[in-house]
Image (cartoon, rainbow, N blue to C red):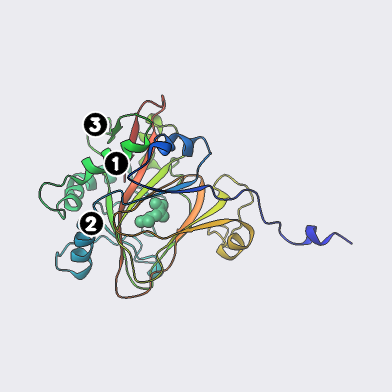
Amino acid sequence: MPELQDQVAPRIRRSVRSLDVDARDVSAVANVIEDMYDDRVDVIVVRNALDGAMLARVGAQLDSGARPVAWARPNEKMPIEDLQLLGTDTPATPTFQAPRGASLDDYLSSAATHASKASAVFDDGFDPAGAIGALLGRFSGGRPVELPRATDGRAYVPFTIRRLVDGKQIGVHHDYHYRLDLYRELSQQVDTRTLVSYVATLQAPQAGGELVVYGAASDDPDLPKLPNGFSFDLAAIEERYDQARIATRAGDLFLLASGRCLHRVHRISGAQARMTMGGFLALDKSRERVLFWS
Ligand SMILES: O=C(O)CCC(=O)C(=O)O
């Protein structure tokens, strides 16, 4: 007769290593991007990292339609995951429209047309890509933070604005995307050990919308999957792994080792959408620069 502990799935491995700091004092985390790369930290929330009142105003204008924009909907086929996007119609991730991601050429063409549309929603005098670069520089251990360029000179998208309305969510996933064609060039430039998401909140929803991070690593060969062999089994992940649940407000930023940690965004409830802006970042191969894109 096997021991009881052998019959139940063990609650696995490590806890999620999370930090929560205020932007007024980040001296202790000034090199946290490297800490995330070296597997010492999984997620950090920086409260009041950007001007929350300004971001909330832009978020509300976009959400109400007072400032009309053409949202891309790359996950429309899967209604519960129907994320709305501004800044590209060809995200640097797999989508339900393109499960293996877009081609690098389509991504760069879309960047040339759409990236400026996300910048244009901000007040005159605010340079969002510059502000993101400066903000990420507070966590880069003194490394310069730069937007990558393709070998033909075209720029990557610096950030996208994301809208999740009532009933929508981002399902459990990780962001180890270097195997996609879209990363053909970037994966030659950056340290592919992991990849970090950066996300700032413009508007929190009335309920839901929390980031949930699991102590489950993307390279774990035993990650629970559904019978289709493709999607992660959320119930089993919730059962087996430690989790951290993080709520953010306008102006807060999180950095997440999203290439390593499984994570999701909890379903939104209420009339007010969850509005965020963000993308990814990575150390370059020599660890001398930080590159960011979306
Ligand atoms: O909070 C967001 O907008 C997206 C979070 C996420 O799933 C990611 O960055 O991979």
- Asked if marks 2 and 3 touch (Cβ < 8 Å), the reply is no
Q: Which residue is mark 2?
A: 55
Distance (Cα) linking label 2 and label 1: 15 Å
Q: Is mark 2 within 8 Å of ligand 1?
A: no
* Closest to the observer, 257 or 68: 257
Is the residue 56 above or below the residue 149 in the image? below
- Measuring from the top left, give residue 92's x and y in whole percent: 34, 47
Residue ID at (41%, 34%): 31
Residue 227 appears in the figure: no
Query: Mark 1 belongs to which amino acid?
Result: Leu
Q: Quadrant of the N terminus?
A: bottom right
Q: Which residue is mark 3?
A: 152
Is the residue 141 above or below the residue 195 in the image? above
Pick whichever of labels 3 and 1 is earlier in the sequence.
Answer: 1
- Asked if marks 2 and 1 touch (Cβ < 8 Å), the reply is no
Q: Which circle, 3 or 1, is nearer the viewer?
A: 1
Residue ID at (42%, 43%): 196
Is the residue 88 above or below the residue 203 in the image? above
Residue 162 appears in the figure: yes
**Quick one: SS at disc 1?**
helix
Residue 6 sits in which quadrant?
Answer: bottom right
Q: Which residue is mark 1?
A: 135
- Measuring from the top left, give residue 285's x and y in whole percent: 41, 27
Q: Residues within 10 Å of mark 1 (few under 14, many from 20)?
A: some
Distance (Cα) linking label 2 and label 3: 34 Å
Pick whichever of labels 2 and 3 is earlier in the sequence.
Answer: 2
- Asked if marks 3 and 1 touch (Cβ < 8 Å), the reply is no
**Quick one: SS at disc 2?**
helix
Query: Mark 2 belongs to which amino acid?
Result: Leu
